[in-house]
Amino acid sequence: MRHPVAALLFILVSVVCAGRVTAAGDVEAVRSLLIERLALMEQVAAYKWENDQPIDDPVREANVLKATLARAQAAGLDSAVARRFIVAQMEAAKTVQRHYFTLWQGETVERSDGAPDLVTELRPRIGALSADLIVAVADSWQQLQTCAAVSVLRPVPQEFFDVPRAWNIAAKGVLGVRNDCP
C-alpha cells in the first residue's frame, strides 16, 4: 500500500463518522417513538370521551408504573431515571388527553363510538411503543447526555404545536433538567 497512514486515517474517520450517524440515529429513534406514542393519545382521549371515562386512573397508572419500572431497570436504566421517564410519559399522555377533552367540551362534540377500543387496540400499541422506548432510551443513554441530543429532542414536533406542553414534559422525561445546553 502506498500511503498506509492515509489508509489508517481514512479507516479511523469512517469509524468515528459511523458512530456519529448511529448516535444521531438512536436519538432520532427516541424522538420518533415519543411522537408515535404521544400521537395515540388523541385516540385514547376519543375513546374515553365517547365512553364517558375519566382521563386519570390512579390505580391503573400505579400498576403500569410498577410493571414499566421493572422493564426499564431490566433494560439497564437507573431506577430514578426510569421513574422520571415513565412518570413524564404518563403525564404527557394525560396532557394531550386533557387538551382534547377541553377542545371537545368547547365544541360540544357528540359521542360517536368511532375511536379504536382502548383495551384491545390502543393499550397494546401503547405498551409496545413504551417497551421500544425503554430499550431505545437505554441503548442511547450516553448520546442522550449530549447537547446534540437536546437539540434533537427539545423542538416541539409539528404534530404537537397545539399542545406543546405535552411534548416538553415527554422530552424532559428523557433528558432531565438540562440547563447546560442552548
Image (cartoon, helix red, strand yellow):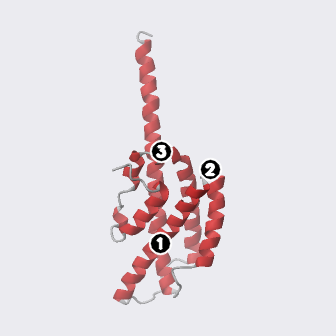
Marks 2 and 3, the one that precedes in the sequence:
2
- Find disc 2 in the rendering and name its residue: 76
Marks 1 and 2, the one that precedes in the sequence:
1
Secondary structure, mark 1, is helix
Q: Is residue 92 above or below residue 17?
A: below
Q: Residue furthest top?
A: 2
Residue 42 visible, this orientation: no
Among the 4 quarters of the image, the one containing residue 87? bottom right
Q: Is residue 20 above or below residue 92?
A: above
Contact? badges 1 and 2 (CB < 8 Å)? no
Q: Quadrant of the N terminus?
A: top left
Q: Name which residue type carries label 2.
A: Gly
Q: Name which residue type carries label 3.
A: Gln
Relative depth, front residue between 70 and 129: 70
Task: Give the left or right position of residue 131, taking residue 145 as reference.
Answer: right
Marks 1, 2: nearer the viewer: 2
- Find disc 1 in the rendering and name its residue: 41
Mark 3 packing: few (<14 Cα in 10 Å), some, or many (20+)? some
